[in-house]
Amino acid sequence: MAKSSKVRNPLSVLDEDPQGVSLGLELPPGALIDRPGRRGWWKEPEPLLWVSDEPVGVGALAAYRSSALAAAGLQAVLLQGRPGLERWWQDREFVPQRMSDPDDHHVEPVLREFWSRVVPDPEEGEDGEGLIAPFGRAWPGLAARGPDGTDPEGAACALADELIESGFLSSPRLALVPAGRGADVPTAVGWGGPTNFENDTALISAVLRSWEDRFGARVVALGFDELHVSVAAPPRTTAHALPVAAEHFAFSPDNIRQGSGSIRAYAEEAVTGSKHWGFWWD
């Protein structure tokens, strides 16, 4: 039997075509970041992602987030530094070898397990009850899918422009990541943003996949410990937003515990009609 040939990394095209002209792109100067691991004369480095050398501006994501790029197996996202960690992606922060496969996980059991970790202890009494009201300690189940919305990719590019123009993303770099869908980008690169909460980012991607399907969500930007997602079909009423807020609490409890203070307040402030879902992990 003939030995099967190794599947070529989609980023390999940038070795011969640095500007991505063959993909219909005109990339700015950038560099490939290799997959971490042992090196030897017998093993060539494998690129993990490509990152632009300089920050990009308004219109950048729209210019490079194309159907041709997706067909080539690459996803375009933004990477955002922060004071003291301006280029965290160059500091061996990625650990793809530690992640499982998102295909091995289902959103409902993932969120149910997350919920069991973060739901207040009975000893917290009324404060704990108020934090998760109108829900109790039992997992409330998945929220219904969102209403018909706008084009998800258009919403992603619009949010990127809004975050850049407002200064929320002050110096974002363009990144290209080999992944079949945007939800898998955090796992594909081995992003460790939620590591103090969950160190297998495939579970995070399993939830993001479901949000892609139910709410037209798309990954727009990754920070050292932040994730920014566009939403094409957000809940339009507080009643619909409440179970979505419960999912967010299970996914990123600091959004509520160190932010809005309760699921109810968070649903009203950050979910109802919101086309930007931002998450962070302490």
Image: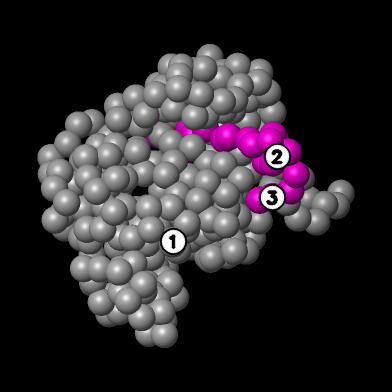
Which three-letter amino acid code belongs to the residue tagged 2? Leu
In this rendering, would 3 be left or right of 63? right
- Between 124 and 206, the one lying in front of the other is 124
Image depth: mark 3 or mark 2 in front: 2
- Quarter of the image for residue 269 reads top left
Disc with the residue nearer the chain's start (2 vs 1)? 2
Q: Position of residue 201 (x, y in %)?
A: 52, 59
For residue 38: magenta?
no
Work out whether residue 186 or residue 240 is closer to the camera in this orientation and state it: 240
Q: Is residue 130 visible?
A: yes
* Magenta range: 71-94
Looking at the rendered image, the disc whose residue lies closer to the viewer, 2 or 1, is 1
Kind of residue sitting beneath label 3: Glu
Disc 1 marks which residue? 257
Dot 3 corresponds to which residue? Answer: 93
Q: Dot 1 surroundings within 10 Å: few (below 14), some, or many (20 or more)?
A: some
Can residue 18 be seen in this snapshot? no
Residue toward you, 243 or 62? 243
Q: Which residue is mark 2?
A: 85
Marked residue nearer the N-terminal end (3 or 1): 3
Label whose residue precedes the other's in the sequence (3 or 2): 2
Mark 1 residue element: helix
Please provide percent x and percent y for residue 256.
40, 58
How far, Cα to Cα, is label 3 from label 2?
11 Å
Question: Could you say which quadrant of the image residue 172 lies in?
Answer: top right
Rendered residue at 23%/71% (across/down): 135
Left or right: residue 195 versus residue 68 is right
Residue 207 lies, in percent from the top left, at 37, 58
